[in-house]
Image (cartoon, grey):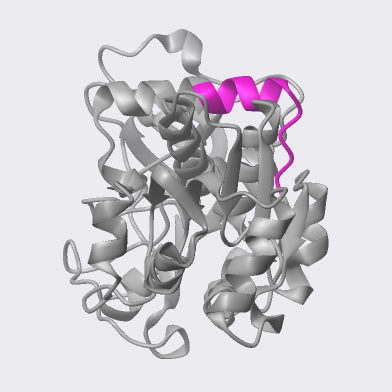
Amino acid sequence: MKAAFYTRNGPADEVLTMGERPKPKPGEGEVLVRVAFSGVNPSDVKSRAGRPLAGDHVIPHSDGSGTVEAVGEGVDAARIGERVWLWNGQWGRADGTCAEYIALPQAQAIALPDGVSLETGACLGIPGLTAAHAVNLLAREEGARSVLVTGAGNAVGNLACQMAKQMGLTVIGTASARRGALAGKAGCDAVIDRHSSPGRDDLATAIIEANAGKPVDAIIDMDFSSTSKLLGQGVLKPHGVLIGYGSNDMTQTAFDFRQALFNCHRLLFFVVYELLRAEREAALARLASALDAGLSVAIAEILPLGEAVRAHQAVEGGAVCGNVLIGC
């Protein structure tokens, strides 16, 4: 089968190679999926750049969609021909979705609802489940009426905004001018360009003013290294919660502990690859419900398999507004 793969870490144009790899066979409890689209996420390009390889090669990408072509022992043959979307395709293993085929446990191939495209399906694994789990954590907050979503024009934040609006919450989003329109389409009650505020006090003031002069009840955050600086500025109410799934600075983020302590702020962090089984099932249910309610996925570009390098560069450069897919 044709696949994009790498045998060492480095820049996409130096290490990503197109070539032939053995077509996988489904083992016990597995399905073989003919991949239609492979989703490229920021974590995929970071893995290629620096995460130790899971074997002597890596076929990248954890997200994808396609059609079940064969099943392994113990899997209902009725699944053959089923349209599916995939999660954790390359997590903890060498072979991901950037290939014509992938074999993986059947639980990681979710049937696509009628009317949901394969293109949309390829964007649901990391962005969709991250947003769904974040909103599930938000839903536990008794009396929560408002949420700040940072990166509302990015893949995860955009879906989180839509799901929070489906819950009836007031949603304040931050987004660059370039991504503001996308954040607006997600239903944000206000979109604030954090880059246009000269200082953090100005940004905090804008957020509070957008929420009728009150601090928000919760924050869903993509970059704790930036948002942590707002916690001491009155943006988050006492006993409020910050739900975080990323940080540009992964090692040395500092914040005002005294302010967080005496405001009884709670910090909940998670990585979508490692959700507990019950958390994953709840996120899948939230995502299915959101799709039924009209969840919209923004797709910026679809490139052929032979242009995997350009797809990685597009995501790494951060210039695209929406998901980048590879047609396999």
Q: Is 216 inside the magenta-drawn segment?
A: no
Image position, residue 20 (x, y; %): 41, 64
Q: With respect to residue 42, does 38 lie above or below?
A: above
Report the number of discs: 0
Which residue: 30% across, 58% down? Answer: 260
Q: Is 294 inside the magenta-drawn segment?
A: yes
Q: Quadrant of the C terminus?
A: bottom right
Q: With respect to residue 107, does 209 lie above or below?
A: below
Which residue: 47% across, 88% down? Answer: 13
Query: Of residues 194 and 321, which is closer to you in this image?
Result: 194
Question: In the visual, does 260 lie left or right of 323?
Answer: left
Image position, residue 114 (x, y; %): 72, 19
Image position, residue 181 (x, y; %): 83, 61
Q: Quadrant of the N terminus?
A: bottom left
**Residue 37 in view:** no
Query: Of residues 141 and 245, which is closer to you in this image?
Result: 141
Query: Of residues 183 and 238, which is closer to you in this image?
Result: 238
**Residue 52 in view:** yes
Q: With respect to residue 201, does 133 lie above or below?
A: above
**Which span of residues is magenta-colored?**
286-297
Which residue: 47% across, 56% down? Answer: 221
Which residue: 31% across, 62% down? Answer: 259
Query: Of residues 60 and 217, which is closer to you in this image?
Result: 217
Question: In the visual, does 18 lie left or right of 187?
Answer: left
Q: Quadrant of residue 308?
A: bottom right
Q: Quadrant of residue 241?
A: top left
Image position, residue 304 (x, y; %): 65, 65
